[in-house]
Amino acid sequence: MPALLFLASLSIAPGPGQERDGGPQSFDVVVYGGTSAGIAAAVQADRMGKSVVVVSPDVHLGGLSSGGLGWTDSGRKEAIGGLAREFYHRVWRHYQDDDAWRWQSRAEYGNKGQGTPAIDGNQRTMWIFEPHVAEEIFEALVAEHDIPVVRDAWLDRESGVEKDGNRIVSITTIDGRTFSGKQFIDATYEGDLMAAAGVSYTVGRESNATYGETLNGVQTARAVSHQFDFPVDPYVVPGDPSSGLLPRIHPGPPGEDGQGDHRVQAYCFRMCLTDHPDNRLPFEKPEGYDPAEYELLGRYLRGGWKGVFNKFDPIPNRKTDTNNHGAFSTDNIGRNDDYPEASYERRREIIAEHERYQKGLMYFLANDPGVPEDIRSRAASYGLARDEFVDNGHWPHQIYVREARRMVSDFVMTERHLRGLEPTPDPVGMGSYNMDSHNVQRYVDEHGHARNEGDIQVSPGGPYSISYRALVPRAEECVNLLVPVCLSSSHIAYGSIRMEPVFMILGQSAATASCLAIDHGSTVQAIPPDALRDRLLADGQVLDLPDSTAHRPSVPLSSSDLDGVVLDDTAAELVGAWPTSSALLPFVDLGYRHDADAGKGTKHATFRTPLEPGRYEVLLSYTPNPNRASNVPITIRHAGGPSSLCLNQRRPPSGPGPFHSLGTFPFAGEAAVEIRTEGTDGHVIIDAVQFLPR
């Protein structure tokens, strides 16, 4: 049974505002959720002189930050301030002690981090850590501030929120404990308090049209990462559709690109593994194990895939934060769509199924004779870390809820705000990580091969501000609740915002606003913006950076403002992985794509559109650079037949702007411009194609 819902309650001594007899308890601020955001919120409330309680469904504090996510997903470290930075300073301080290095030396560990060094001596921060270290820091924070924490306390979602009009009066747990307060903060990953309080929310992916985005909704053409690198047969009997599909493949079509649906990105557990023989527990066969569940992976491995260990990211003491990587990995794709709104009982079932799946996956890799020996032997050299999650069979106590409910308030953070295309009012923190959605379903494509759908990894182009208004419900729905985790955001914007450092940042900012609302006798919607900004800056929050998206030009060139027929790279038919970039200006719309100077000959892009009969000049947009290919093969298919040429993308385009003329051709019906990569000697760039009547 997963510990998330079954661990026994830990007793605590009553703190300020608590009663020993179990009667109603009253506080200035009631925080629901013991996540990293919840602890940051509680500490901030206490530092601002308010009585506060953490009502936590979980026994362990810190959520994913103490639940295995030690390889910090953060983006730009200079965008992280306040209590979040204090947390990473405390991590640094812990590892300054030689006794903290039990299973390997500090020198052996080195200084590898995600984009920046793991250990920053100048800033006295450390960004990579073991799960138990994070939990000890969260426990130390609540102890130092004498914050009462009520554990294993689950909100009565049916009748446990008492409201007086649009104001929450109290919350009650399913075991009958009641907590009243002036202000409430929902710091859970699921948004249960928000939903039970009658606040508007959504689940799943909006369509691109909903907020004028490009990366939302169903994503098949763009899902090129964590994808099958070569065809893999999806049928029980290879080549025989009548034999049925292998397990874990969705039987229907994936949907139309850009259209909204109910699906959420896949969940997994961030396992803490080790290959140290004195601390390693071998992978055991889980109850109900069926190797057929992993036959698709077996075929992929036997076909030559070697990427199993690419996300065994090193954390101190010869351990890993093991995350999903590749087409078939720890992500339990398509098995969590009903989790966000499911009952507690149904969530237990979903979590248990995820645990069985992932434990079975590791046992399969380490033991199944159909797994190639080089992979099998290396997998067998790892195991669960004996000194982590010691009260839960050494398995993480927190499933990775990458996305659940998202509030819908008067202001919604979208892709356009992250990219700097629209202003972000009243900032209370910053994010900078990629807009990152994991896959949501696995299906059979038109060629009869297994395919994943939903993965997006696109940079917003720099750090961006997050608006206070996205933390605040609509006033008519609730005036004393703040939501720093399930905030008001589109699916694809949430894919960047949903990082643990950002949750700590927003938890602190939410608590600051809650305390100011008490001080000013106002609703959370009406606190003075200047007072909030001044206090956040005084407490070390980072609200803006010189090179953030707010300082970038909006759209260098908008396809809708250009003459003729313009196809952006979002409209191209792509074969192979074409990552998106916005590093070099100018470009059309929100960015451009490149072939990563890899997989030459396996990738190509086609721009296709109907044209009225006539002659058109064809122009291709690209940004020149010395790392570009000097010999890009291009074919224009027109009424006179195909015309081929070779383009040097190291040289500046002929103009205007980033466009280079490929010539003038007759068209009658469909036009196509094909860009290939075989034999090219650098990065191949695709941005936009323009057809101008001549």
Image (cartoon, grey):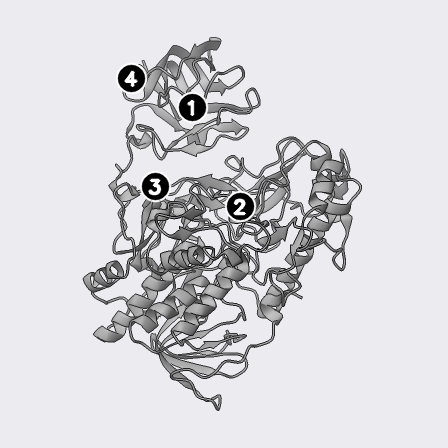
Which percent across, then down, holds residue 183? 34, 74
Q: Mark 3: which secondary structure?
A: loop
Which percent across, then down, holds residue 541? 29, 57
Outermost residue to the front: 98
Earlier in the chain: of badge 1 and badge 4, it is: 4
Which percent across, then down, holds residue 344? 58, 69
Front of the two marks 2 and 1 = 2
Give the camera-side residue of 251 and 694.
251
Report the side of 435 relative to 355 (left or right). left
> Disc 1 residue type?
Ile
Crowding at dot 4, Cα within 10 Å, few <14 / some 14-19 / many 20+, comes out as few
Which percent across, then down, holds residue 281? 70, 56
Residue 422 visible? The answer is yes
The label shown at residue 655 is 4
Give the camera-side residue of 570 and 309.
309
The residues bearing labels 2 and 1 have C-alpha atoms spaced at a distance of 38 Å
Locate the C terminus and report the quarter of the image it occupies.
Answer: top left
Quadrant in the picture for residue 181: bottom left
Q: Which residue is mark 1?
A: 685
The label shown at residue 462 is 3
Front of the two marks 1 and 4 = 1
Proximity of marks 4 and 3: CB atoms separated by less than 8 Å: no
Q: Mark 1: which secondary structure?
A: strand
Q: Which residue is mark 2?
A: 109
The residues bearing labels 1 and 3 have C-alpha atoms spaced at a distance of 21 Å
Asked if residue 409 is positioned above or below residue 151 in the image, the reply reads above
Quadrant in the picture for residue 269: bottom right
The residues bearing labels 1 and 4 have C-alpha atoms spaced at a distance of 16 Å
Report the side of 100 relative to 282 (left or right). left
The residues bearing labels 4 and 3 have C-alpha atoms spaced at a distance of 27 Å
